[in-house]
Image (cartoon, coloured by chain):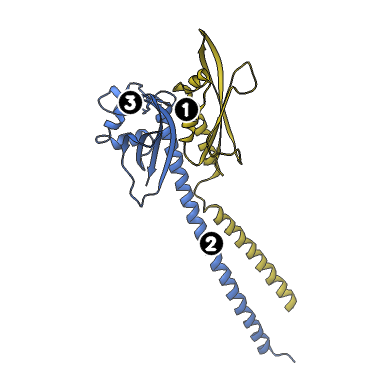
Amino acid sequence: MREKGFAISLDAVIALGLAFIFFAAVSYYFSFPESSSFRSLKLKEASFDLGAVLEKSGQLESAVKDNKTIELRRILNKTPNNLCFQLKVFSPASSNPVLSVRKSGCPAKYSELTSIKRSFVVLENNDANFYWGEVNAWNRE
Amino acid sequence: MRTLNSKGQIFSVELIFAVIVFLLILLLFLNVSLSTTQKIGRRDSFNERYFLADNALQQLLWSSGNPSNWQNLSSLADVNSLGLAESKNYLSKQKVQRLVDLNSSSYSEVKALLGLNNYGMHFAVYDFDGVLLKEFGLSPSSESESVVIERFAFYDGSIVKVKLEAFK
């Protein structure tokens, strides 16, 4: 009778222990105010914004014309510290980027990467040529 | 011969011990449960603020408003929605200036048009070196629970940072 009762008590303790661990895990999870879905949203918005403003400010066109990435890097370096960006510019004639620049101090180490593409036109020798910029964004680790 | 009396005593000691253990575990359980409920509440509140602030800023950066010439109207009575964009991420100087001018007279109406009725808001445009160019709204107090959304835009010939803070 005593052994049987002990077995039942042990079962109950294990069950309550498991329930406690479950609630502790839930509590730990909710202790972080920002969910991963918001981090993903931030990355998408940041990469879209960067592509849009670089195109609308004429920086992408100037960089292709001058074949220089100094100004692009200056802009990337002034983005928020927790975000990393890499910008590549492609021409339809080649699969290799004609320009590539990465924010300083941002190694390509990430658990999540967001990528957007944005086309733009460069006027060269009275001719309009299509290019596209690819903005990759990730959180600094 | 076992007596009824001694059997009952053993049972009582075990019962008391079991009840104490049970109450301790129950207390822990209730404590964790209450703490989790509070954290879920805070998370819900944060999510709602984030969602509303993100939507409001998206509206300002991507839309020109309805009607699109709202900046020329004398009041916001006939304005259905606010937007600062000439095109996506390209801010109109006139619309930004009109929003700034509305700060003293129509703070609540602007908040309502952006879906932030239940929150305070602060909207600001900074250059890329962090110098404040334009602002609208109130600054939150140090005790406020706030969410800050930061985006990039093109304004007055430069790339700028645009921040919207929603707080309670």
Residue shown at the point (75%, 92%) measured from the top left: B1
Nearest to N terminus: mark 2 or mark 3? 2
Residue A23, percent from left and from top: 58, 58
Residue B54, percent from left and from top: 44, 37
Task: Give amino acid for label 1.
Answer: Glu
Q: In front: B160, or B107?
A: B160
- Whether labels 2 and 3 belong to a single chain: the reply is yes
Task: Give amino acid for label 3.
Answer: Lys
Residue shown at the point (35%, 39%) measured from the top left: B122
SS under mark 2? helix
Which numbered marker is on residue A71?
1
Q: Is residue A41 visible in the rendered structure shown here?
A: no
Q: Tags 2 and 1 in contact by the CB under 8 Å rule?
A: no
Q: Quadrant of residue A111?
A: top right
Q: Tags 2 and 3 in contact by the CB under 8 Å rule?
A: no
Q: CA distance from mark 2 to mark 3?
A: 50 Å
Residue A134, percent from left and from top: 57, 26
Which quarter of the figure is the N terminus of chain A placed in?
A: bottom right
Q: CA distance from mark 3 to mark 1?
A: 29 Å
Task: Give amino acid for label 2.
Answer: Val
Question: In the rendered structure, the residue with mark 3 lies on which chain?
Answer: B
Chain A: its colour in the image is: yellow
SS under mark 1? helix
Mark 3 sits on what residue?
B95
Mark 2 sits on what residue?
B32
Chain B: its colour in the image is: blue
Within 10 Å of disc 2 (Cα), the crowding (few <14, some 14-19, many 20+) is some
Which quarter of the figure is the C terminus of chain A placed in?
A: top right
Depth check, mark 2 against mark 3: the one in front is: 3
Within 10 Å of disc 1 (Cα), the crowding (few <14, some 14-19, many 20+) is few
